[in-house]
Amino acid sequence: MIRRPPRSTLFPYTTLFRSKRLVPLFDRVLVERFIAETKTKGGVLIPEKAQGKVVNATVVAVGPGSKNENGSVIPVSVKVGDTVLLPEYGGTKVNVDDKEYYLFRDGDILGKWES
């Protein structure tokens, strides 16, 4: 009889999702966008229409990568926990446990912030 290891060892990043799990496929990357600033440094409230589109996000989960013509897997260029720069528009919106996440292809991510 074959025993499966506990789910937390199979998918360590899925502990964020209590009731549902979302595992990206191929070269997809699941990100959580930063929250837009609603106040200036001086304390003035910024109306919603004047707020800029948030282009920074944190990587929550990544797929295994895409396959090339030979059948070998090309790994994704970001890892869980990286802060990335996204295009202003695009991605697929996904709601999991009342949180908004976005799915992007690895090639659509514009850059990665290094500290």
Image (tube, rainbow, N blue to C red):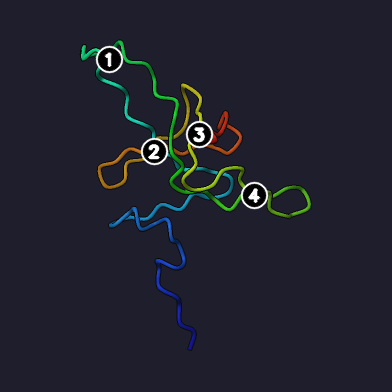
Q: How many marks?
A: 4
The answer to which of 70 and 76 lies nearer the viewer is 76
Helix, strand, or loop for circle 2?
Answer: strand
The earlier-in-sequence mark between 4 and 3 is 4
Tag 2 residue: 32
Amino acid carrying mark 4 in the image: Pro
Amino acid carrying mark 2 in the image: Glu
Tag 4 residue: 75
Helix, strand, or loop for circle 4?
Answer: loop
Name the quadrant containing residue 52.
top left
Helix, strand, or loop for circle 3?
Answer: strand
**What's the residue at 30%, 10% (across, down)?**
50
Tag 3 residue: 84
The earlier-in-sequence mark between 4 and 2 is 2
The earlier-in-sequence mark between 1 and 3 is 1
The reply to whether the C-beta atoms of the residues labelled 4 and 1 are less than 8 Å apart is no
Q: Nearer the viewer, mark 4 or mark 3?
A: 3
Q: CA distance from mark 4 to mark 1?
A: 40 Å
The answer to which of 112 and 66 lies nearer the viewer is 112
Amino acid carrying mark 1 in the image: Thr
Question: Where in the figure is residue 23, as x and y percent of width and height?
Answer: 46, 53
Decide if residue 32 is on the left or right side of residue 108: left
Give above or below for 65 relative to 103: below
Give above or below for 63 relative to 35: below
Q: Nearer the viewer, mark 1 or mark 3?
A: 1
Decide if residue 26 is on the left or right side of residue 1: right
Tag 1 residue: 40
The earlier-in-sequence mark between 1 and 2 is 2
